[in-house]
């Protein structure tokens, strides 16, 4: 696949010099460096695997957690609050 890279001149010169020192073509060293960078990121970086955000924990002013409520129990509480049940 062909692509175009827009590199700063100093970076390009370093890349070209490194390729020359290793006896590689520019595209060969680019491919090696990109593959090595991707492999390092996937293996070593905790950011490499997407993490789910944790939901906030709601605490009472006393610092204790609120009990987990089922959908049915929440519906009951809402209905009670609206005056539909329990009166």
Image: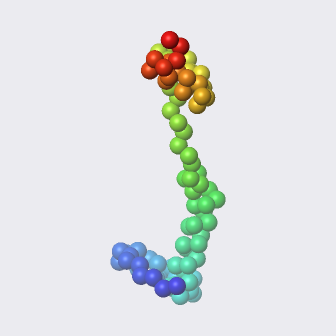
Q: Residue furthest right?
A: 43
Q: Residue at x 58, y 61 (%)?
A: 41
Q: Residue at x 59, y 54 (%)?
A: 49
Estimate the x, y position of residue 39 in percent, counting from the top left: 62, 66
Question: Is residue 45 in sight in this rendering?
Answer: no
Q: Residue at x 59, y 22 (%)?
A: 67
Q: Residue furthest left?
A: 9
Residue 79, compared with residue 86, is above or below; it is below
Colour approach in the figure:
rainbow
38 or 18, which lies in front? Answer: 38
Estimate the x, y position of residue 45 in percent, counting from the top left: 58, 55
Total numbered labels: 0
Estimate the x, y position of residue 52 in percent, counting from the top left: 56, 46
Q: Residue at x 54, y 72 (%)?
A: 34
Residue 72, compared with residue 41, is above or below; it is above
34 or 60, which lies in front? Answer: 60
Estimate the x, y position of residue 44 in percent, counting from the top left: 62, 56
Question: Is residue 19 in sight in this rendering?
Answer: yes
Residue 19, compared with residue 60, is above or below; it is below
Residue 23, compared with residue 9, is above or below; it is below
């Amino acid at each position: 696949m062909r692509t175009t890279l827009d590199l700063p001149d100093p970076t390009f010169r370093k890349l070209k010099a490194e390729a020359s020192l290793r006896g590689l073509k520019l595209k060969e060293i680019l491919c090696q460096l990109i593959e090595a960078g991707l492999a390092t990121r996937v293996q070593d970086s905790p950011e490499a695997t997407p993490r789910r955000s944790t939901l906030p924990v709601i605490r009472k002013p006393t610092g204790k957690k609120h009990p987990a409520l089922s959908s049915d129990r929440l519906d009951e509480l809402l209905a009670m609050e609206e005056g539909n049940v329990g009166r």
